[in-house]
DNA sequence: GCCGTTTTCGGCCCGACTGTTTTCAGTCG
């Protein structure tokens, strides 16, 4: 069982205990324990073998016992007991906005509702409105929410959500009275899927004109909440947007508050409390005097808490606060550290722009070099290259390199790793390249043993620079293929083959969790945009953000090397 | 249930908004 599975069971214990009405701090303890295990880069089972997992922050005797039982018998006693007492269907109801544990309990006790279907029936029959504390409006909202969930299913991939958020931000920025505006929330933290969009605005004047402008945007469908400081609306495409307005000198505090994560806030506020301070969305306040000691910027907020600045990507509710106190936070990779892009396509295969056009755009972006990596012939649908075409393509890349000033073009390829692990190109031609991305594009459904063998065999050719989009997952789509993580990471480390953090909007593969795992095993990472057009080169941003979430520094990624150093890696 | 730079007992983040209420519980982030 992997860490995610342990974390899921503990999380479900927390939810079911909430519905049962247990002590809120006990519930939080299970949530904390769940997150502690989820955030590990090591396997929890390995940690159990090595010693005592109660050393983990958030895991005590009880949770350790549940975890141990889960491993040995495949079931957790506490989880089982709750499921016998309640109903597993209740776990689905918690996803419905507006329904929390208290109302779910009420619905379950009074009407026997234990799943979304039963809830819909009861709402349509008008039974919900008759319950104590519920009414017509609540009933109507539940029906709407059920429709929405049935349609969209929940979270939106980061790249799509980010584009929508910035479209709204750009429009609101033009409204008179808006002084500062920023997209916050999980988009700013770089979570790979997004629940809703958060935008923070500061103004010295009236809030109403700004909210009026917001709710009249063409994208906005329905207004959900309209208050004096906060307005929420649902876009026509179903995504919820929350806009929060504060005074000018409160912007830093509000941005911090709205960026989250919730878990980071809980830990930070606990720390503040011990220091005689209180944090809310308006600032850090001395409890005794009521004096505001920080509010303008996030930097000043961390400063008064005697912490190094914690970048948004690291505000995950793990050990980042302890590390900030000890000055041990990693000096995270920045976009400026990326000197080149090593994965892109041109009109030779399925790209939309020529070698020269890609080079021009890359130079504008400030790169020193790019590797041109078109497909090999196995990807027929993308017009993959035969050896003859590839040979000519290498010559054209070299020719273009001479003709385009100010940037180095590295001849490369994205070569398919075939079903048996062999590479879809003449080895002699691969040896001529400065950069070789090896990728899996078909036969995803091999057994874990077969897929592991396939990847290991490819690495052992000694011809790959990196593995492209290594897990094969599609964001919001198919899961990655099955293979033995430890074996492949070990092989990659042994052969000096890097793993790609692919920034293309449909993938984000590796994601942050995997990238951190790779780093912990001594594997180098490399960022690639997988661009199929000049515009696509900008998707490197998402790779940088995942790298930051993984805690990677400049020295962890090959893109910080010079063109010469990159080419030398293969010699 | 977990934790300890006042603590092995006594705490555990903080505020906005809605709907159903005559002063607040529930939910959300």
Image (cartoon, rainbow, N blue to C red):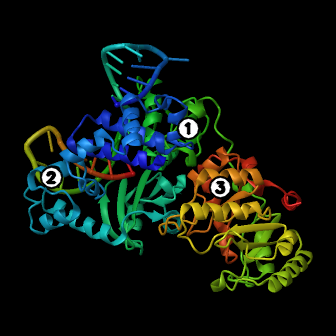
Q: Which residue is mark 2?
A: A108
In which chain is the residue bearing label 3?
A
Q: Which residue is mark 1?
A: A320
Tell if the residue under mark 3 belongs to the same chain as the one under mark 2.
yes
Query: Would you identify the image quadrant in which residue A311 lies?
Result: top right
Query: How many residues crowd around disc 1 within 10 Å: few (fewer than 14), some, or many (20 or more)?
Result: many
Q: Nearer the viewer, mark 3 or mark 2?
A: 3
Q: Is residue A377 visible?
A: yes
Q: Position of residue A223 (x, y in %)?
A: 31, 65
Element type where label 2 sits in the image: helix
Q: Earlier in the sequence, mark 3 or mark 1?
A: 1
Q: Between A496 and A39, which is closer to the camera in this rendering?
A: A496
In which chain is the residue bearing label 1?
A
Q: Earlier in the sequence, mark 3 or mark 2?
A: 2
Query: Residue drawn 88% across and 71% down?
Result: A432
Indicate left or right for A147 with A323 as reference: left
Query: How many residues crowd around disc 3 within 10 Å: few (fewer than 14), some, or many (20 or more)?
Result: many
In which chain is the residue bearing label 2?
A
Could you tell me how far apart the alpha carbons at marks 2 and 1 are, in whole angstroms? 39 Å
Query: Would you identify the image quadrant in which residue B3 lies?
Result: top left
Query: Residue drawn 68% across and 68% down?
Result: A421
Could you tell me how far apart the alpha carbons at marks 3 and 1 are, in whole angstroms? 29 Å
Query: How many residues crowd around disc 2 within 10 Å: few (fewer than 14), some, or many (20 or more)?
Result: some
Element type where label 3 sits in the image: helix
Q: Which residue is mark 3?
A: A488
Q: Position of residue A122 (x, y in %)?
A: 12, 64
């Amino acid at each position: 069982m992997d860490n995610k599975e342990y974390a899921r069971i503990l999380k479900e214990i927390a939810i079911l205990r909430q519905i049962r009405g247990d002590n809120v701090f006990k519930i939080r303890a299970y949530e904390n324990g769940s997150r502690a295990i989820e955030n590990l880069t090591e396997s929890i089972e390995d940690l159990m073998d090595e010693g005592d997992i109660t050393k983990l922050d958030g895991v005590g005797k009880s949770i350790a016992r549940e975890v141990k039982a889960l491993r040995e018998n495949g079931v957790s006693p506490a989880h089982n007991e709750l499921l016998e007492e309640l109903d597993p269907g209740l776990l689905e109801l918690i996803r419905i906005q507006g329904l929390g544990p208290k109302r779910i309990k009420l619905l379950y006790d009074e009407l026997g509702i234990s799943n979304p279907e039963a809830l819909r029936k009861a709402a349509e029959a008008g039974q919900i409105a008759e319950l104590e504390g519920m009414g017509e409006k609540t009933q109507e909202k539940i029906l709407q929410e059920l429709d929405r969930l049935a349609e969209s299913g929940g979270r939106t991939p980061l790249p799509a959500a980010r584009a929508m958020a910035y479209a709204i931000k750009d429009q609101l920025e033009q409204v008179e009275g808006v002084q500062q505006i920023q997209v916050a929330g999980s988009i700013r933290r770089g979570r790979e899927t997004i629940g809703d969009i958060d935008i923070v605005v500061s103004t010295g004047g009236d809030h109403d004109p700004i909210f009026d402008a917001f709710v009249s945007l063409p994208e906005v469908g329905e207004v959900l909440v309209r208050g004096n400081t906060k307005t929420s609306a649902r876009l026509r495409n179903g995504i919820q947007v929350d806009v929060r307005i504060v005074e000018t000198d409160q912007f830093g505090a509000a941005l911090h508050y709205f960026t989250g994560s919730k878990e980071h806030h809980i830990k930070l506020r606990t720390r503040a409390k011990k220091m005689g301070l209180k944090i809310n969305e308006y600032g850090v306040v001395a409890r005794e005097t009521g004096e505001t000691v920080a509010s303008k910027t996030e930097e000043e907020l961390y400063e008064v808490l005697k912490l190094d600045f914690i970048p948004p990507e690291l505000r995950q509710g793990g050990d980042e606060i302890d590390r900030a106190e000890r000055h041990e936070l990693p000096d995270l990779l920045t976009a400026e550290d990326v000197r080149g892009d090593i994965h892109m396509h041109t009109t030779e295969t399925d790209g939309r722009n020529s070698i020269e056009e890609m080079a021009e755009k890359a130079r504008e972006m400030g790169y020193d070099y790019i590797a041109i990596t078109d497909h090999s012939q196995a990807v027929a649908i993308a017009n993959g290259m035969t050896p003859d075409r590839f040979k000519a393509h290498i010559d054209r890349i070299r020719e273009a390199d001479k003709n385009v000033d100010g940037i180095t073009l590295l001849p490369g390829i994205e070569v398919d790793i075939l079903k048996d692990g062999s590479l879809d190109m003449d080895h002699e031609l691969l040896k001529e390249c400065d950069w070789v991305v090896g990728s899996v594009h078909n036969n995803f459904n091999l057994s874990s043993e077969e897929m592991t063998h396939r990847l290991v065999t490819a690495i052992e050719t000694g011809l790959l620079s990196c593995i492209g989009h290594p897990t094969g997952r599609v964001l919001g789509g198919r899961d990655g293929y099955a293979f033995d993580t430890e074996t492949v990471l070990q092989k990659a480390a042994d052969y000096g083959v890097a793993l790609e953090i692919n920034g293309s909007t449909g993938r984000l593969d590796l994601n942050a969790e995997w990238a951190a795992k790779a780093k912990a095993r001594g594997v180098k990472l490399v960022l690639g945009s997988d661009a199929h057009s000049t515009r696509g080169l900008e998707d490197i941003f998402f790779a940088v953000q995942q790298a930051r979430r993984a805690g990677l520094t400049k020295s962890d990624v090959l893109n910080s090397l010079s063109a010469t150093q990159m080419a030398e890696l293969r010699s």
